[in-house]
Image (cartoon, rainbow, N blue to C red):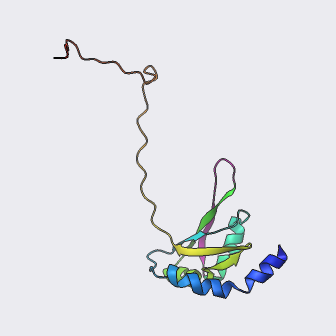
């Protein structure tokens, strides 16, 4: 594993030159960044350590699966200013973190979720009846 990291860690500049121009086209509108390509073993603390050199972090969160508690392979990093977030985006995009190449993009605002459906009548059980009276079918 160490040999694999050593071989590929030297080529991160090649990866950065190929992917960074594609991913750095959009401008930042908020200081929150979306980080994809995370290892399943990357923790909140590892993410924070990797990104704190670019400015004052307000949050570093790896998103985990509720059922298993394992990382879903992405997370979010928030800074105090947009300028710090932009420096982090340029500095960490297409770099290695815990043996995996990560990509850093602007976070999209979360979409409001639809309200949950109203609770059903516990006596109904999903069976409906035809309440038409006097219908003859003509």
Q: Quadrant of residue 96?
A: bottom right
**The C terminus, quarter of image:** top left
Q: Residue 14 vs residue 136: left or right?
A: right
Measured as percent of width and height from the top left, residue 125 is found at 46, 22
In the image, residue 65 above or below residue 103: above
Q: How many marks?
A: 0
Residue closest to the far right: 2
Closer to the camera in the image, 8 or 57 = 8
Closer to the camera in the image, 8 or 51 = 8
Residue in view at x 78 percent, y 78 percent: 5
In the image, residue 43 above or below residue 50: above
**Bounds of the magenta segment:** 55-69
In the image, residue 6 above or below residue 122: below
Closer to the camera in the image, 30 or 19 = 19
Q: Quadrant of residue 84?
A: bottom right
Residue closest to the far front: 138
Measured as percent of width and height from the top left, residue 13 is found at 65, 88
Q: Is residue 43 magenta?
A: no
**The N terminus, quarter of image:** bottom right
Closer to the camera in the image, 137 or 98 = 137
Residue closest to the far left: 138
Residue in view at x 60 percent, y 80 percent: 93
Measured as percent of width and height from the top left, residue 72 is found at 64, 59
Residue in view at x 71 percent, y 66 percent: 42
Measured as percent of width and height from the top left, residue 122 is found at 46, 23
Q: Residue 73 vs residue 109: left or right?
A: right
In the image, residue 127 above or below residue 76: above
């Amino acid at each position: 594993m160490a040999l694999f990291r050593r071989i590929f860690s030297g080529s991160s500049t090649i990866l950065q030159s190929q992917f960074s121009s594609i991913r750095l086209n959009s401008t930042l509108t908020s200081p929150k960044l979306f980080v994809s390509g995370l290892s399943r073993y990357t923790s909140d603390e590892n993410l924070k350590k990797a990104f704190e050199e670019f400015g004052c972090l307000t949050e570093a969160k790896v998103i985990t699966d509720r059922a298993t508690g394992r990382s879903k392979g992405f997370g979010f990093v928030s800074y105090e200013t947009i300028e710090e977030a932009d420096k982090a985006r340029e500095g960490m995009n297409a770099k290695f973190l815990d043996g995996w190449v990560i990509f850093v993009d602007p976070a999209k605002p979360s979409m409001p979720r639809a309200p949950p459906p109203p609770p059903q009548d516990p006596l109904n059980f999903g069976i409906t009846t035809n309440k038409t009276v006097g219908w003859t079918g003509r």
